[in-house]
Amino acid sequence: MATAADSKQPPSPIKPLPIASPSASILLISPSNQILLLRRVQASSSFASAHVFPGGHIDPDDGPLPPHGDVRLHEDSPAYRVGALRECFEESGILLARDRHNNSKNTSNNAPSSSSSSSSSSSPLPFQLTEQERDAGRNAIHQKQVRFQDWVRAHGGIPDTESLHPFTRWLTPAHIPKRFSTQMYLYFLPPAHPGIPQSLHIPTCDGGVEHTEAQFLPAAEWLSLARAGKIVLFPPQFFLLTLVADFLTAAADDDDDGGGLTAAEKLQAQRERLQEFVKMGDPPWGEKCISPWPLKKEGKRLVMGLDEPGPELDGTDRRGDAERVVFVQFKGKEGTSGMEVGWRKDVVEPGLQEGDEEKYLEARRKERELSGGGDGELEQALRGRREKL
C-alpha cells in the first residue's frame, strides 16, 4: 500500500547559473565631448532596436581570459581592452590606434591643456588610414579573416589599449537567460587639430549587420530622447550617460565666460573633471561591479538597486554603487520607459524595515537556486546588507 512518503515528489533539480559571457563596451567621447551611440537592429538577440555603446563579445583572438568560475574573469585585462577596441572598429568604423613608429600615448591626458600648451609636440597625431583601407579591414576583421591586432600592426599601428579608462563593470542578473559580464571604458578622442582629418571621427553603421545608426550627441540629449520615448536605452546605458552628463555638457561655447577660458580649454576642463570623478568613490568607479536587482516597486516602475556585484562575485570584496538606484519600467519587446536615476536614501529608509528582510531573503534565494548556493550563504549575504545599511 502506497504511503504519503512514497508519493512525495523528488525535489526539482537546481538550475545551473547561466554563464555571463565576457564583453566590453566603450563610452567614446568626441572632440566636442559628445557620446557615440549605435542603434541595434530589430532582429538582434539582445537589446533589439536599443541604442547602445559600441562593444560586444570578447573573442578568443582578443587574448586569454581566466576560466568561468574564476573571479578574475570579471576584472579588467588586456583581452577586454583589445576586444573593446576591435568591436568599436567593427561597429563604428572608428579605429582607436596610434602610430607604431611614434609609440607614445595619444589621449586627452596628454593632449595640450590650458596650462600646458607646450606639450603638443609630445602628442602624436592619431593613426590614420584611407577610407578604402578602413572599410576593407573592418570587413576582414568582422569575417575573422585576420586578427584585429595583426591587421593594425600590419598597417603600422598599435591598438590604443592604454587610453581606455575603466568605468564600471556590469553583470547581468542571474534570472536572465542570456547574461554578460561587461567591462565599460571611457575613451577620449583627441581634441580638434588641423592635422587630424575630420573623417577619422565620423562613425558609420556596419551596413545593418548589427546596427542601423551611429551618431554622436551630447549625453544630456541622449537622455532627453530616451525620456521622450524616441529611443530605447537600458539601465546600464542610461545610468552611465546620467553620470557623464554632469561633466560633459558639450556646450563649451555657451554664454557663461567660464573664467575666461577658450572653448577648447572648457572642453578639456570638462574631461579632466570627469577623469577625476572616475577615480573617486568607495570603490572607485573604475572598480565598481554592478548587477541590478529589484529593490522595490513604485507604481509600474521597478526601483533597481545597484549595490550588488552579482552571484559570481558573492563572497569577494567587489561592490557596486550603494548610493544610487535606477527607476525603470520594462515593457517586453518595446524596451523600457520611465527611466530615471535617483538617490537610494530617498526611496529606502535607513535600516531594514518590517518585511524587507524576508523580501530580500526571497529575492536572494531565487538567485542562489540558480547558482547552487545554500541558505547559509543567504544569511551571510543578509548580514552584509545589514552592515551596509
Image (cartoon, rainbow, N blue to C red):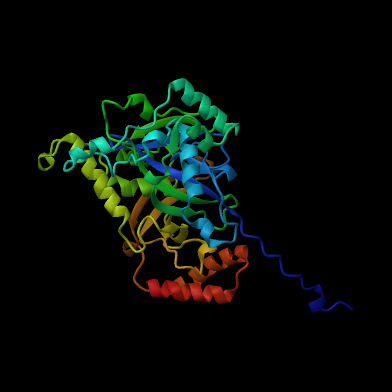
Residue 355 showing in the rendered view:
no
Name the spot of residue 70 as percent of width and height, x first. Answer: 57, 61
Quadrant occupied by the N terminus: bottom right
Q: Which residue is at the far front?
A: 101
Q: Is residue 68 left or right of residue 184?
A: right
Q: Nearer the viewer, residue 112 or 216?
A: 112
Residue 133 showing in the rendered view:
yes
Q: Nearer the viewer, residue 122 or 73?
A: 122
Name the spot of residue 285 as percent of width and height, x first. Answer: 36, 56
For the point 41% across and 61% down, the residue is 320
Quadrant occupied by the C terminus: bottom left
What number of labels is visible? 0
For the point 63% across and 67% down, the residue is 372
For the point 56% across and 32% down, the residue is 142
Q: Nearer the viewer, residue 309 or 136?
A: 136
For the point 39% across and 34% down, the residue is 101
As drawn, 135 above or below 1: above
As drawn, 22 above or below 174: above
Name the spot of residue 365 as percent of width and height, x first. Answer: 56, 68
Q: Is residue 94 left or right of residue 181?
A: left
Q: Which residue is at the far right?
A: 1
Query: Hey, which quadrant is residue 107 in on the image?
Result: top left
Query: Hey, which quadrant is residue 325 in on the image?
Result: bottom left
As drawn, 79 above or below 49: below
Query: Hey, which quadrant is residue 268 in on the image?
Result: top left
Name the spot of residue 40 as percent of width and height, x first. Answer: 50, 35
